[in-house]
Image (cartoon, coloured by chain):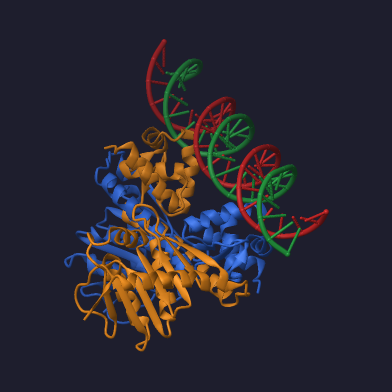
Chain colours: A blue, B orange, C green, D red
Amino acid sequence: MVESPETLASTIESLKSLGLTKYEALVYIALLQAEGASASEIHEISTVPRASVYPVLDRLVQKNLVSVSHSTPRRYNAAPPGEGIDRMLRYIEADAQRAREALTEIYRNRTHPEHGRQELIWTINGEETIRSRLVEITAGTEHSLDIVSSYAFLGHTLPALLPKIRENVTLRIITDHWEGKLPEGAELYLLPPLDHIHSVHRKLEETAGVFIIDQTSALVLMGGEFISPTALYSESQGFVNFFIRYWDFIEKISKKSQ
Amino acid sequence: MVESPETLASTIESLKSLGLTKYEALVYIALLQAEGASASEIHEISTVPRASVYPVLDRLVQKNLVSVSHSTPRRYNAAPPGEGIDRMLRYIEADAQRAREALTEIYRNRTHPEHGRQELIWTINGEETIRSRLVEITAGTEHSLDIVSSYAFLGHTLPALLPKIRENVTLRIITDHWEGKLPEGAELYLLPPLDHIHSVHRKLEETAGVFIIDQTSALVLMGGEFISPTALYSESQGFVNFFIRYWDFIEKISKKSQ
DNA sequence: TAAATGTTGTTATAACAAAAACAACAAGGG
DNA sequence: CCCTTGTTGTTTTTGTTATAACAACATTTA
């Protein structure tokens, strides 16, 4: 059975990210389709040029993905998919561990020269990076953490932040609504309903989130669910002041919740 | 601090297997050494040509491994090693899962035409492949499993085989010695001490193991601890008969253990 | 204050290496 | 004798490496 060209193409790309070349992927896939195939049969199934099939098979044997018979013509078997993928992954994981150890040593001895650090505005890309940076940044909060964000975002973000925030930190949250228990000691402000002040509410959804840490640094989430999410972070006082004023403004039109 | 050229080179190779190009690896490593570095500083640390640093940084940002400041000159930060490596691994693991699913579907529909299958002699490479094939082959045993192998090998191989072998299978083992409890119902034959029959003992170490399944198929381990281990497997009656005779010969010079 | 110099960021191109693709041929089997 | 198998060499293509060139901006110097 042959699958769609798109599925085949994406499977090849996946196998390439596991360390196979295009021809290696095609030959492996062909062997999964036909046990005990000869090189000519593999050529017919995969459309890899017949002369290229032999060295590709040699490399797959070396990678322990294929076994070969002693016969004429030689016949080949592929490791079943589970085994084959696990084996390729294990090689890569071993490399990952070696890289991690070497890079951790390098990172431990890094230099972090001052470059007017406070004046820099950093762009952070990717939901995962943003979340991990948010955890790291808020974990260092000493006095106050002021948040403006939608409950949709906070609902699954706060559980990761709160355990790492010191108990005496003043936490003030402006959001569109709230469900369930409020974090202990937190002050909650609710935005007026949508039909009250349109432009500000739309602005909140567009902005997706503002986090002000100790009135000295700020992380701002830009919108973008369909494209890669982006955030800005800075310790620049001008940048932070802008968002402190933004927060104050939003607070004035919100209602403190008991 | 700069590490040895060998360590750097092997770290680069490890990062390449995680999907980075050589220049991407060098730039990432440079950024781990110097937080908040500019492109020129990265060029100086990594020796990547300055003009090449910019597109490489763009790709690293897209891979969520680097964040960038809005400043002149632009400054860059790397994701810490743990995060960076985990992130790269997760992309690859996602590809692995997609490939596994696609290939499992293909494999389910494979053809396995007869090609005088019983006459083929298969070469199996790699300790892991050999072990998994051994488990698979011996799990299908119906009547008898005859083994000649060193205790060094059996000691850590049998525990994986035994749970999958049917209870009524006759298990006969010839080995150099035995420690601990014998598998229930198994017959044990001990080879004479080394100084008695030199050549046969050396032959056992060289061969490393013979497994005869139901007197109809055989898997033979060739030696080679320092090079990649290799095994031969066949259902060819000539092949199996040879090793049945080999087993009988070894049995005659061994002593059945109570 | 203007000119000169250096830096930053970008784009285009050349060189190189690995993979893809093809050509050719010897040996063996039917 | 013809077809198949297996091998080797060569060419082409592709992606990465490496370099050259240039515009814009920032800094320094006269």
Q: Residue furthest bottom?
A: B168
Residue A2 lies, in percent from the top left, at 66, 71
Q: Nearer the viewer, residue A67 or B87?
A: A67
The quarter of the image holding the C terminus of chain B is: bottom left
| The one of A76 and A110 positioned closer to us in this rendering | A76
Depicted A203 relative to depicted A54: above or below: below
Q: Is B205 above or below relative to A173?
A: above
- Is residue B220 at least partly visible in the picture? yes
* Vertical position of residue A191 compared to residue B196: above or below: below
Snapshot quadrant of residue A145: bottom left
| Direction left: furthest residue | A168
The spot of residue B64 in percent (x, y) is 43, 54
Q: How many numbered badges does the structure rendering display? A: 0
Along the viewing direction, whichever of B209 and A60 lies nearer the viewer: B209
Can residue B80 be seen at all in this image of the molecule?
Answer: no
Residue A158 falls in image quadrant? bottom left
Indicate the quadrant containing the N terminus of chain B: top left, top right, bottom left or bottom right.
top left
Which residue is found at the position 29% from the left and 37% from the top? Answer: B2
Q: Position of residue B111 (x, y in %)?
A: 62, 75
Which residue is pictured at 65% across the width and 62% down the height?
Answer: A46
* Relative side of A203 to A7, left or right: left
What percent of the width, then of the height, locates residue A167?
17, 68
In screen coordinates, is A56 left or right of B23? right
The residue lying toward the viewer, choosing from A73 and D26, is A73
**Rendering quarter of residue A166:** bottom left
